[in-house]
Image (spheres, helix red, strand yellow):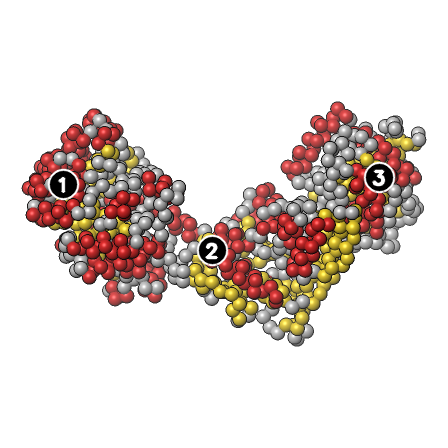
Amino acid sequence: MSPMARTAPVPAATDPAIIRNFCIIAHIDHGKSTLADRMLQYTGVVQSRDMKAQYLDRMDIERERGITIKSQAVRMPWDVDGVSYALNMIDTPGHVDFTYEVSRSLAACEGAVLLVDAAQGIEAQTLANLYLAMENNLTIIPVLNKIDLPAAQPEKYAVELASLIGGDPDDVLRVSGKTGMGVEVLLDKIVRDLPAPVGDPDAPARAMIFDSVYDTYRGVVTYVRVVDGMLHPRERIQMMSTRATHELLEIGVSSPEPTPSKGLGVGEVGYLITGVKDVRLSKVGDTVTNLAKPAADSLPGYADAKPMVFSGLYPLDGTDYPVLRDALEKLMLNDAALVYEPETSAALGFGFRVGFLGLLHLEITRERLEREYNLDLISTAPNVEYEVTLEDKKVVHVTNPSEYPSGKIAEVREPMVSATILAPNEFVGAIMELCQSRRGVMGGMDYLSEDRVEIRYRLPLAEIVFDFFDILKSKTRGYGSLDWKADGEQVADLVKVDIMLQGEQVDAFSAITHRDKAYAYGVMMTGKLRELIPRQQFEVPIQAAIGSRIIARESIRAIRKDVLAKCYGGDISRKRKLLEKQKEGKKRMKMVGRVEVPQEAFIAALTTEESKDKAKK
Amino acid sequence: MPSVLPLGDPAPSDGLLPQQAADGAAERAFGLYVHIPFCAVRCGYCDFNTYTATELGGGASQDAYASTAISEVEFAARALEQSGLPARKLRTVFFGGGTPTLLPAEDLARILRAAIDTWGIEPGAEVTTEANPDSVTPESLQLLADAGFTRVSFGMQSAVPHVLKVLDRTHTPSRVPQVVKWAREAGLAVSLDLIYGTPGESIDDWRFSLETALSYGPDHISAYALIIEDGTKLAAQIRRGEVPEIDDDDHADKYELADRMISDAGLHWYEVSNWSATPEQACRHNLAYWRGDDWWGIGPGAHSHVGGVRWWNVKHPTAYAGRLGSGVSPAAGRETLDAETRRVERVMLEARLASGLAVSTLSDDGRHAVAGLIADGLVVPADAFRGRLVLTLKGRLLADAVVRRILPD
C-alpha cells in the first residue's frame, strides 16, 4: 500500500520522469466514473468527506449541462517508494461516433487502463479502442472491475483479456471501484508499469490538443498534452493547422478544479484559455506552438472532423425556424464535428441539412435541440455522402436524395466502414445473415474466449445508419455490440427511389438505395404512407418510382362521408367551434399538391425503429 | 340538444339582450322551441338533456313542468320587450325532447296556449311536436290538433326489431302505421324520423326501414346517420367491443340509398338530412334555425338565438325550475356573435340547404374555392353559375369538408 503523496510535484517544474499519463478504456456502464472517483479520493485530490458533496454534485450539474464543465484531464499526486509522482488521468469520449477524438486522447497518453466489467466481458467498442491504443504503442494495464458482484466471472474474463493483449491471466488486476478494493494497487501499477513521457525540453514548444470544450463563462477551454518545450502564460501561441494566433490568457492543470500554473512542460497535461468563443478555432488533434519560437513540424495525426451521416432537421412549427438556427449556432460552439447548411424541402418547409459523425451523434444532437431549446423537430431519414460521377465526368457529392442528379450517371461511389461485432458464438449465424443482407463482406472471425466471438465485416455505411444496430441487438438478445470506422468507398449499383402522392414527388421520402433493395423500400414506404395519411375527398395514388418507372403503388380511397347529420338550434355553437378546431388542425397539415398530410404522418413515416432506442453503443 | 353546453360569456340574470339583438328584428321571423326533458327510458344512443320520470321532483317534476315552462314564456316576453324588441307573432313552434308526448296532451296544449296568448300566432303558422309511437292515442292527437298543433314528427327510427333493440327503442314497429293514421285523421301533417348506420344494421335492413316508412306516405322524412356521442351507453358498448364500430363508408352507402328511395317516392331533399313531399311541407321551424331567424328556447338546456345573440339554459330541470321560481333568467351562458362569426355560421348552415348559399356570402378566397368544388363534383355547376352554391349528392355527404374549403381563412 502506498501512502498518499506528501508533497505533490509542482506543475511547470515537474521532471517528466515522475509523470504518468494514462486513460481508462471502458464500455459505458463498466464503472469508469466510479473507479475515477475512487482514484481522486485515494490520491487526496478530493477529500473523502467531500466526495459526495463535491464530486458527485458536480456530476449532477454535468448531467444538466451536458459535457461542457467536465474535467477532461485530472492531475493526481501519488507516492511510490518515497517518490511523489504526478498522474494525469485523461478522459476519453464515451461513444462510438467519436473514434477520432478517442485516438487523440490515446495519443496524449503513454498507457491505458483497460477496464472491463467482470460480469460482462469486453464490448466491441472497448475492443476497438484497445486496438487503437495498441496501435499507438500504449502500455495496457488490464483490469477487471466490479469483482464484488455475485455475477462476476473474473477467471473467465481474465483469460479473455490476457488472450487479447498477450500475457498471463494472473496479471489481470481485479478491482472494485465501488468498495475501493485493488484501487491503490492499480495506482502503484500505473506508476511502475507505464513509461514516463519523453520530449525535448529545449525544442520549440509543441502541445497536442486532445479536447476542446466551450464554457459559458470562460470561452473555449483547450486541453493539451505538451510534447516538447514549454508553454507559459501571457505568451502568444499559434495553432499550426489554421495558423491562428492567440494570447495565452491562462494555463494550468485540473486537480480537479482548474488551477493556474506558471506553465506546462514536457509530458505535462493541462488546459489553455485564450478567450476564443468557438471550438473550431481550437481543433482536436491540432498542435499548439509558441508564435515567437515556432516549431517546424506539427505533431502527426491531425485530421479534420469529417461528417459521415446527414439528415435534414426541420421544425414542426415553421415559425420555430429562427430558434433552430440559433440553437444550431450555439451547439456548434461546443461541437467541432457538427456541420450544417440551410435547406428547403417542398414538403417540410425551411430547415437545415446537418452532418454528423454518426447516428448516435445525430440522436444526441437532436435530443439536445429538442430538450434544451424546446423544439419539436422532424428529422429526415439519415443519409451518407455519395460521390456521383456523371457521363460528362462531372462529379457531384450528394448528401440529400433530392440533390441526386437526374442526368446520365457513369458511376456512384458510397462510403464503406469496417465493422467489428462482438457477441456470444451462438449468434454468429444470425449476425452473418444480417451483415450479408446489408451487402457486407466478411473480413474475419476470432474467438475471444470459448464462447465469445469477434466478427469483422466491411459494409456500406448507408446499410448501418438506418436500423442495423437495433436489429443486431434484437438478433443477439441484447448481447451483441458494434463498433465501426470509416474504411474507404466502393462503386455500387445505387438508384434513387422517389415517392409520389397523387403524382407529386415528396422530397422528404426519397431515398438512395441499392438497386436490389429499391423495390422493398418502395413497397415499405407506400404501404406505410397508406396507413398514415388520412383519406381525402379524392382518391390519392401513392407511387414509388425509379426515374419514370413505377416500382410500387398503393392508393388511399377517397373519403365519402364528412358531414354531421344533425345540426339544429342547440348544435350550432358547438358545430361552429368544431369547424374552428378543424381549421386550426388544417393549419398543421403540410400540403403536398392537393393532399393534406398531417405532420404526424411525416414523423411516423420517417421514424425508424432505431430512433426509439437511444442506443448506447 | 347535445349534452355538453358550449362555453360562453355569463348571461345576465334579468335576461336582457344587447342592442344588437333588436336591430332589424322586425324583418326576422320569430319562433318558439319548447324542450320537454322527459323520456320513459333513456335510449342507448341519446345524449340529449332528458330524464326518466322517476329522476326528478319539485318544480322540475313532470306534473309541474307545464307551469314551469309557462313561467319562462312570461319571462321571455318581458325580457324581449324590455330589450326593445318589437312585438312579433309566432311563425313556428316546435315541441321537442325528450318525449313531449310523455306529458299529458293537455299540458302541451296549455303551454302552447300560453305562448299564443303571450305573442299571438301568424295565420298558417307551423306548430310541431315530436312524438314516440308508444305515447300517443287517437284522443291525445285530436286534442293536440284542436289546441293548434299542425304537425307531428314520429320517432320511428327503424322498422327492424334487432336495430330498434340496439337503439333501446321500445315501440313495436307495427304501431307506426296506426299512429300515422290517427294523426292524419286528426288533421296533422306527419313526419317520420329514421336513423341509419346503427351497429348491426345491414343495407337490406335499412332498405326495409325505408320501404316501410315510405309505404305510410309521410309528408316529410328526416333520416340521420347515427352519431356515437361520448358518454352514451352505446359509446361504452362500442368501446368494450360489445357492438361493432360504425363505419363512414356504410353511412355513405345508406345515405345514397335513402336519397334515391325517398326521391323515387316523390319527396325532395331540402336539407342534408331532410326530405319533404312539397316545399310547403318542409319543416319551417328547422329552416328558421338554418336561416338565422330568431327563436326563444323554453326549457332546461334549451338554446335560443335572437339577432346574433345565442344563449342556453341551465341543463338540470331542478336548477332550471329554481331559477324561474325566483324570477332569475335560466340562462347558463351566452355569446354575442360579431359580423364575421355570423357570416361563418351562415355559410356553415345555408350550405346544407337545397336552396343553397349565395356565393356572394363568401370571401374572395372562398369564391375561388368554388371552381375546385365543381371540378370535384361536390357543387351543382348550373346553380353556381347563377350565384348559388348548392351541394350535389356527393357534396351533401362531404358538406363539412366543403364548408372548410369555402371558409379558407
Q: CA distance from mark 2 to mark 3?
A: 56 Å
Q: Residues within 10 Å of mark 2 (few under 14, many from 20)?
A: few
Disc 2 marks which amino acid? Glu
Q: Chain letter of disc 1?
A: B
Do marks 2 and 3 share a subunit? yes
Q: Could you tell me which residue is drawn at 67 percent across and 67 percent down?
A: A492
Above/below status of A247 relative to B329: below
Q: Chain of mark 2?
A: A
The reply, left or right, for residue A582 in relation to residue B61 is right
Q: Is residue A345 left or right of residue A84?
A: left
Q: Which residue is mark 2?
A: A531
x, y percentage for residue A163?
A: 84, 46
Horizontal relation, residue B124 to residue A143: left or right: left
Q: Which residue is mark 3?
A: A172
Is residue B322 visible to us here? yes
Secondary structure of the residue carrying tag 2 is: helix
Which is in the foreground here, disc 1 or disc 2?
1
- Element type where label 1 sits in the image: loop
Q: Earlier in the sequence, mark 2 or mark 3?
A: 3
CB contact under 8 Å: marks 1 and 3: no
Tell me what residue is drawn at x 69 percent, y 56 percent: A432
User: Which residue is under mark 1?
Assistant: B136
Q: Amino acid at mark 1?
A: Val
Residue B239: horizontal and vertical position, in percent? Answer: 39, 42
Query: Subunit of mark 3?
Result: A
Q: Closer to the camera, B146 or B359?
A: B146
